[in-house]
Amino acid sequence: MITPEVELKTGFVLDDRGRIVSTREPRSSHGPLLTIIRSSTETAWAVHKDVPEEQAEQIAVLARQEPAVRELRAAPVYAAEYLALTKGRPGFAGPALTFPETLAPAGEVVAVEDERWLERHFGGWQLGEISAGRAPVLAVIENGVPVSICFCARRSDATAAAGLETAEGFRGRGFGPRVTAAWAMAVRAVGRVPLYSAAWSNAASLAVARKLGLTAHASFWSTSE
């Protein structure tokens, strides 16, 4: 069963205190100052290790009082207090989604194992990044090069969160749902559970979720530097 706690541990490396050390990915980043993941039955949260202990303890007191979520788009009850205590600004917010048990055949896609194949439309990939934690990487191919890719944005031993990119000029052609479905099946084939999230403001990513019949089970909310 996927819970807010599982989502938290998929996305972030935590220290012995449960504080965020970094994002869980090959080229990790600082991560948010605070992440809260709420469902109808559970709230999980983590504060970055750089936040002073006094403020972290105050955040924990408030987070334990967060009521069950009835409307996933709603901000946490104590959102203003969290922003003040972390001295941050609103960060990522959006639904945490799971894939249906059965996915329709994805159409023609290929696996990408060499980052150099991505250079035409997707900059910033470093050699070794796929094997270090982005795999599986699936792609829709046009004119011999990948134009839409889905990969592991975050990955733990048990779960993987999708990262989806489609090159400009190839959007609106159904490539996103196709390659994401293929990625999810490939993730399941190696024994992990595929996960998906999208910012509330990202209409294209939310449309992919709807087309694939994904189910929102929780809501992310965070503060950032």
Image (tube, rainbow, N blue to C red):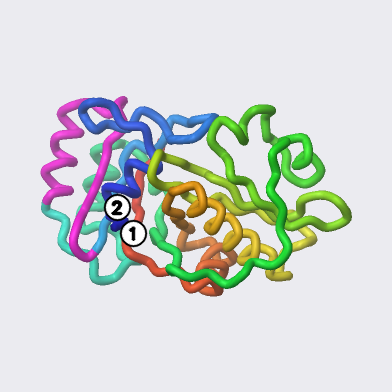
The correct choice, above or below, for 122 with respect to 178 in the image is above
Residue 212, placed above or below residue 65: below
The residue lying at 75 percent from left, 42 percent from top is 118
Q: Nearer the viewer, residue 78 or 104?
A: 104
Instruction: Please state which amino acid type lies under the numbered disc 1.
Output: Ser
Q: Position of 94 compared to 78: left or right?
A: right
Give left or right: position of 224 versus 113. Answer: left
Q: Residue at x 18, y 26 (%)?
A: 53
Residue 198 is marked as: none
Residue at label 1? Answer: 219
- Residues rendered magenta in the picture: 40-64
Verify whether residue 198 appears in magenta: no
Distance (Cα) linking label 1 and label 2? 5 Å
Q: Residue at x 16, y 56 (%)?
A: 66
Q: Determine whether label 1 and label 2 are within 8 Å by CB.
A: yes
Read off the residue under disc 2: 37
Which amino acid type is marked by label 2? Ile
